[in-house]
Image (cartoon, rainbow, N blue to C red):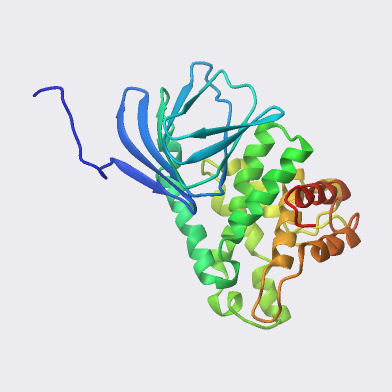
Amino acid sequence: MSGIFFNYKGDYIEKVLSNKSELALLANGGQTEIMLQRIEKNTTFYIYPGDNSELMEFFYLLEGEVALQLEDKIVKLTGGDYFISKDLKDKAFFRTETDVSMLYVSNEQVFHLMSVKMKKLSQMREAVEKKDMYTHEHGERVKEYAIKIGEKLQLSNTRMTCLNFAAGFHDLGKINVPDEILKKPGRLTAEEFEYIKKHPKDGEDIVKGTFIQEAALAIGQHHERLDGSGYPLGLKGKEICMEAQVVGVADSYDAMTSDRPYRKGMEPGEALRELKALAGKHYDELIISKLEEVLKEEGLI
């Protein structure tokens, strides 16, 4: 019959895969898009205010459970429940309690923003993690801690968006580092370390001109340190943007607490003491104090 279109279970127009989620475009017409989103358990995600006051987003939970942080209380939603984003003034914070599947409808085109370019960047990040097997899912963990620290710092929506992308893609430039250096189990030589020192600037250059270019500066600066001992430019103090400083702390914490072939990862409390010892020298004291709050809330210290 003319005007009736149908597809079978599992069909979609296009799908975008990321580390812990997937988004499939099921149908579109005019400005309206209908999507199926699947997100893994224990994943933090956000909904941000749109630039267009007419934007409305509808989310219908098909299965799973989601926790919504609503001012001073937690709201639990499960299969059959739904929520709507309309005239959102501040970002909304969600966490999946289980694997989640939900129908996502928007009256404004959003899928294309995450489509080809996002897919390319995500594939590049996955390639980096395959090159450096000892940092598997490192980017996701750094992003999670960076976002929680940013929340504690009460950063603006714009800065939180930047922080989200900068933390998730901070090591993108390692795509240019030779495998034998990334996979070397022992200490690097001075010459080998020079390759490593190039990755922040390479990452910055990769995301310039993409839809996450706002995160370029923070990616390029995430290994800079307050006393000028960092790289690649040896920036000091306020020359380093806040987002880069937050990513730097989250990155260092995760590196300290992760196992390596030549050493076992530190306990959270031990890593925090190491960071505190460098407060005011390498890291901002306030940022470290916010990380401490996060670790206490999670029962890790």
Task: Give the camera-side residue of 203 and 115.
Answer: 115
Residue 190 seen by the camera: yes
203 vs 65, left or right, is: right
The quarter of the picture where residue 193 lies is: bottom right
175 vs 277, left or right, is: left
* x and y percentages locating residue 245 in the rendered image: 77, 50
Which corner quadrant holds the N terminus? top left
Up-down relation of residue 132 to residue 151 (above or below): below
269 vs 166, left or right, is: right
Query: Residue drawn at (36%, 29%), measured in percent from left and top?
Result: 33
Residue 232 seen by the camera: no
* x and y percentages locating residue 229 in the rendered image: 84, 63
The quarter of the picture where residue 111 lies is: top left
* x and y percentages locating residue 151 in the rendered image: 72, 38
Up-down relation of residue 210 to residue 140 (above or below): above
Which corner quadrant holds the C terminus? bottom right
Query: Residue drawn at (64%, 41%), measured in percent from left and top?
Result: 162
Query: Residue drawn at (40%, 46%), measured in percent from left and top?
Result: 16
Task: Give the camera-side residue of 61 and 169.
Answer: 61
Find the residue positioned furthest to the left: 1
Up-down relation of residue 70 to residue 8 (above or below): above
* x and y percentages locating residue 114 in the rendered image: 45, 41
Task: Give the camera-side residue of 188 and 29.
Answer: 29
